[in-house]
Structure formats: C-alpha cells, structure tokens
Amino acid sequence: MIEQPALRCINFNEVLIASIDEAVTTLLSRQVADALYSHLERVHSVSKLEIPNRLDVLSTTLEQTFGHQGSKTISKAIAKRFYTTLELDLSLSSSGTLIDYIDLAKKMKLQDKGTQI
C-alpha cells in the first residue's frame, strides 16, 4: 500500500492574525498592539478576528497612525512573519503593500500541491 502525503491545512486568518500580533508587539509593544486592536474595534467596528478580511482598514489605520514610512516598516514586518510561518520566500519591493504580499502568499500556497486553505 502506497501512503499518500498528508494534506496540510492552513488557516490563513489565524496565521495572519498571529503575524500581525507578533510583528506589532515586537516592533512597538504589547500596549501598542492592544491600542491598535481597540482603535480598530471602536472606530472602524473591526474586531481582531475580522482583520484578515479588512486589511484595507488595517493598512489605512497604520498609515494614519504611524505615517507612510512607519506603516511600510510595520507592514513588511507582518509580511515577513507571515511568509516565514507559511514557509514561503518573500521578495520585498519598495511599492509592495501588505495586501499585495498577503494576496501573493495565498496564490503561492494554492499552487502548492497538497495544501488546503
């Protein structure tokens, strides 16, 4: 009997939330991460669990709070953690956005045979 490799099931939302949390906490602090989540919930009605489906709101909030360069730095740190967890190679570009990086990761994983999302 030939054994088939086990399918790897990836919950992108959980990995993305963890990547956001780790990156913001590492770069800034736990208090800043908690304040960011509180702001998203209070001002934009976006809970922490909804962030993966509302990356546009997260990106806008990061830009308004930390400025263009600060938001790019945070976004790249999030993307790096996300790609590392998914065991993907990340090629950063000066014009890449968090949404671009996440969309590309999803496409790459869907092409990876044996992976379910």
Image: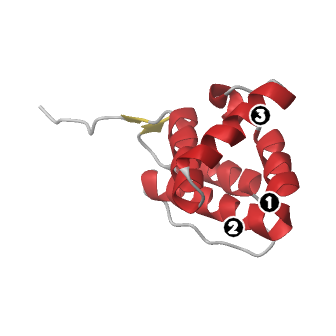
Which residue is denoted by mark 1 in the rendering? 66
Q: Nearer the viewer, residue 25 or 94?
A: 25
Q: Amino acid at mark 3?
A: Leu
Badge 1: few (under 14), some or many (20 or more) residues near its Cα, within 10 Å? some
Judged from this view, the residue extending furthest toward the bottom is 94
User: Is residue 117 something that shows in the picture?
Assistant: no
Task: From the viewer's side, name the closer residue of 59 and 109.
Answer: 59
> Disc 2 versus disc 3: distance between alpha carbons?
19 Å
- Residue of label 3: 40
- Identified at 60% across, 56% down, the residue is 78
Q: Helix or strand or loop: what does disc 1 sit on?
A: helix
Q: Looking at the rendering, which quadrant does residue 69 occupy? A: bottom right
Q: Secondary structure at mark 3?
A: helix
Q: N-terminal of the two: label 1 or label 3?
A: 3
Measured as percent of width and height from the top left, residue 36 is found at 70, 41
The outermost residue toward the left is: 1
